[in-house]
Image (tube, helix red, strand yellow):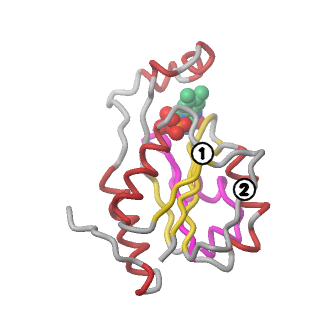
Amino acid sequence: MKTLIAYSTTLGCTEQCASKLKDDLGEGVEMIRISRRRRFNLQQHDTIIVGGSIHEGMIQRSVHKFCESNLEVLLQKQVGLFVCCIDPDANEQELIDRAFPAQLVEHALASGFFGGELNIKKMNLLQKIMTRKAARLQKEPDIDFQSILQFARTIHELGSDDNFNGPIVHM
Ligand SMILES: Cc1cc2nc3c(=O)[nH]c(=O)nc-3n(C[C@H](O)[C@H](O)[C@H](O)COP(=O)(O)O)c2cc1C
């Protein structure tokens, strides 16, 4: 089985989520950080999971570009999509629809909403100012590990059987 998690991260949270997802999915899963300058060979993978985080209402441009420029290949694969963000009132489906090309959203086996963190220590001044309001949220935002596990389960269940040897034993 060959699964790829392609992600972008600004302050490290999406990378943490991708890493947890990798563990939940089991063996044979690779992770790559999407970069605008790098080209990727996606042909060797059966399943491709793409994720990023929401900043000012949008996913990283590199994630959108990655999906657009590899759309033809992605539509031939088993695909999962996920986003990280902290807005407790966010409409999950709307975010996914805005973040990824419509054809890909329709094609995807699963889409996930993994929560997020406000990593103030890693922020520059502008990022701190931009997230000032969010920093006053009543509840500290957090990664939704249960949602990551559920996403991994869905990929296991809906993906072709011989593709996964993963653990997914914990609840
Ligand atoms: C400058 C900035 C803008 C953000 N804008 C939004 C937003 O519009 N909606 C939201 O739900 N979260 C927003 N967030 C929160 C991020 O989505 C959250 O911190 C996420 O965990 C970041 O993941 P990353 O570290 O992988 O980039 C913003 C964070 C920063 C630093």
Residue at 46% in and 80% down: 159
* Quadrant assignment, res 165: bottom left
User: Which percent across, then down, holds residue 64?
Assistant: 71, 53
- Per the image, label 2 sits on a secondary structure element best described as helix
User: Which percent across, then down, holds residue 31?
Assistant: 52, 55
Q: Is residue 166 left or right of residue 55?
A: left
The circle on residue 8 is 1
89 and 8: which is toward the camera: 8
Is 102 part of what is drawn in magenta?
yes
Q: Is residue 123 visible?
A: yes
Q: Crowdedness of circle 1 by 10 Å Cα count: few (<14), some, many (20+)?
A: many
Q: Is residue 171 visible?
A: no
User: Which percent across, then down, holds residue 9?
Assistant: 56, 40
Query: Does the beta carbon at disc 1 come under 8 Å from ligand 1?
Result: yes
Tag 1: amino acid: Ser
Query: Does the beta carbon at disc 2 come under 8 Å from ligand 1?
Result: no
Kindly check if marks 2 and 1 are in contact, taking CB atoms under 8 A apart as contact: yes
- For the magenta stretch, what is the residue range? 78-107
Q: As displayed, is residue 76 above or below residue 40?
A: below
User: Which percent across, then down, holds residue 70?
Assistant: 75, 65
Residue at 54% in and 73% down: 47
The circle on residue 66 is 2
The circle on residue 95 is none
